[in-house]
Image (cartoon, coloured by chain):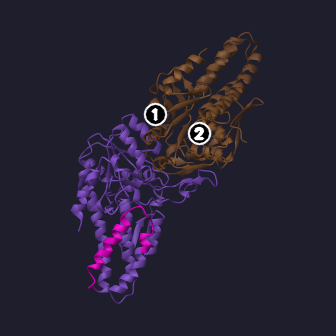
Chain colours: A brown, B purple
Amino acid sequence: MFKTIELVNGKVRMLDQSRLPLEVRYIECTDYTMVAEGIKKLWIRGAPAIGIASAMGVAIGAQKIRAKDFEEFYSALEPIFSTMMSTRPTAVNIEWAINRLKKLLSTKKELSVEKLKSLLIEEAHTILEEDIEANKSIGRWGAQLIKDGDTIITHCNAGALATGGYGTATAPMRVAKEQGKRIQVIADETRPVLQGARLTAWELMQDNIPVTLITDNTAGALMKKGEINIALVGTDRTAANGDVANKIGTYPLAILCKEHGIPFYVAAPTSSIDFSIASGESIPIEERDSLEVTKIWDCQIAPDGVNVINLSFDVTPAKYVTGIITEKGIFKPQDLKKLHERTSL
Amino acid sequence: MFKTIELVNGKVRMLDQSRLPLEVRYIECTDYTMVAEGIKKLWIRGAPAIGIASAMGVAIGAQKIRAKDFEEFYSALEPIFSTMMSTRPTAVNIEWAINRLKKLLSTKKELSVEKLKSLLIEEAHTILEEDIEANKSIGRWGAQLIKDGDTIITHCNAGALATGGYGTATAPMRVAKEQGKRIQVIADETRPVLQGARLTAWELMQDNIPVTLITDNTAGALMKKGEINIALVGTDRTAANGDVANKIGTYPLAILCKEHGIPFYVAAPTSSIDFSIASGESIPIEERDSLEVTKIWDCQIAPDGVNVINLSFDVTPAKYVTGIITEKGIFKPQDLKKLHERTSL
């Protein structure tokens, strides 16, 4: 069993997902700038995973700080916080993790700098463990939506590789299988970075969950043939009104589901719901290098110099979302505010 | 300027499209079995182009026949007809070309075998020339649908490379540009074979038609931003009721257009309309090797042994089609039968 990420001996060890499925290689990040590099270069990706990575990056960065008191320590942390926050803009999880660490520190000003350093390491571990526990809850809630014999379509990778472990969209699949339901998963390859082909297909095959790979173009034809029962995807950031930002191609998939009467569910741990954003229009959409589109590893597939638009994410308006599966239950998009009332401090 | 295909000195010379855009290489097919191989292996592809290739394959195959009379000659042609017919099942154009040659021969039984051989060569040339002329007509009709400043989305390659020349879906783009309209084309890459990235982007750049490449997942986001005005695609086979079989991913694109109020047009020379088929349900949908999905040239992008579904085409029901642009005018899908009444012999 692989580990997406772990903090061990003051280093952050992450599976280099950019090399899957052909190479299973781990990278040991010895300082926080290397963790930030790993996030930018997609050695690690997936909203919950990069949140965890950010917390771990701060934790190991903190160890090297020389400070005599809280103020000096916290000042020295600011550039580390900034570095992590500036890696990628769309997922809310980095912001969420950094804010969680800042809040924790602010309640522990009386501790020595050494104790604060340990606290950050512990909190990074706790964030990872809570992520896995939340995913297991999502699994139990979401499995109720899956019937014996169902074929589930998913997009991108919202599995163990996208999280501390277990996965968000894959969690109900795992639980359903444990419950003895016979399920099939259709993973669309998810260009340009091919998380579906390289990551989802790989991890589901590892876990003996029947998976079939298709190109992104094929979902419509399968739905028309009646071969898809339910869609289950993750999210990088869900707004307060239930608009869902996720990997590019999620929005078309949701429209196809609507057209074919197929329920469209989003697995969203509360760490990925951003109640400070009223609707999807305010979610920043990362655009990445054209090379992701024109080159697949060493293979160039487009003419030199071609113009490219490479939006990494899109926003699915709440009206296309049948339900949002959180660790606290399944909510209709318009009912997400109830969750906020519950989770507000 | 490249030539998709030509018949010269008893050989069929075709651009090897499987190597574009990095290599511009021509293959000289010295016998009909090589032409058939080229069709199966996608050295040449695009419905009108493979129809033309089939006619040319028959013509050069015929040259080597030793026969003393019409019956012997025609018998010797049968396996050549079969070979061409069995290359690929979805496009109607091969069937159309073979039937045209058979019909022609049946009216010329009095000719000598030598004259019949020349007749086939001439008819193959005529089929190519008529294809280009039909495309130019499609261009003139279709350009009426394009306004100055429009952004047109297209799928797969329905350009010069898919035809004898000039293209079907690209024809209105060419005419609109000649008319001085400022247009932009969005070409989605069209996995798995990447005809959009490798062929459409390449040929439009050659002809200075502004083109931007996107992944197949990106169309929805661009439509949501209001950046697409019209969709224009080709067809491999259109049924009598206006159901359209075309490259996989066309059906989702049509649904996205409907959802966003964007007109969806199909460029269909009458040689690609099959009046013998009542609806799209009867159109055979080719499935091709998994390797097209799991490998991009030498790059393997999925786990060894993964299950794959590789449907090469899908069917867009007539209700999603705003209009069908033929060389004889633009028809609503339900009015295609009028065209049949006009073109029936």
Residue A146: mark in rendering: 2
Circle 1/circle 2 CB separation < 8 Å: no
Report the magenta residues as a range.
Answer: B82-111
Residue B317 x, y percent position in the rendering:
37, 50
- Numbered disc 2: secondary structure: loop
Task: Answer left or right for B107 relative to A230.
Answer: left
Is residue B342 visible to the viewer in this orientation of the structure?
yes
Instruction: Say which quadrant the C terminus of chain A sits in.
Output: top right
Write the residue at 64% across / 17% down: A102
Which residue, given by chain and number where applicable, does mark 1 sit on? A320
Disc 1 residue type (three-letter): Tyr
Q: Between A299 and B32, which is closer to the camera in this rendering?
A: B32
The correct choice, above or below, for A181 with respect to B288 in the image is: above
Write the residue at 44% across / 49% down: B249
Looking at the image, is mark 1 or mark 2 earlier in the sequence? 2
Write the residue at 59% across / 18% down: A342
Tell me the quarter of the picture where residue B274 sits: bottom left
Is residue B335 rendered magenta in the image?
no
- Numbered disc 1: secondary structure: helix
Mark 1 neighbour density, 10 Å: few (under 14) some (14–19) many (20 or more): many
Q: Between B101 and A45, which is closer to the camera in this rendering?
A: B101
Task: Answer left or right for B48 relative to A332.
Answer: left
Q: Between A184 and B223, which is closer to the camera in this rendering?
A: A184
Residue A8: mark in rendering: none
Tell me the quarter of the picture where residue A270 sits: top right
Disc 2 residue type (three-letter): Ile
Write the residue at 53% across / 41% down: A230
Mark 2 neighbour density, 10 Å: few (under 14) some (14–19) many (20 or more): many
In front: mark 1 or mark 2?
A: 2
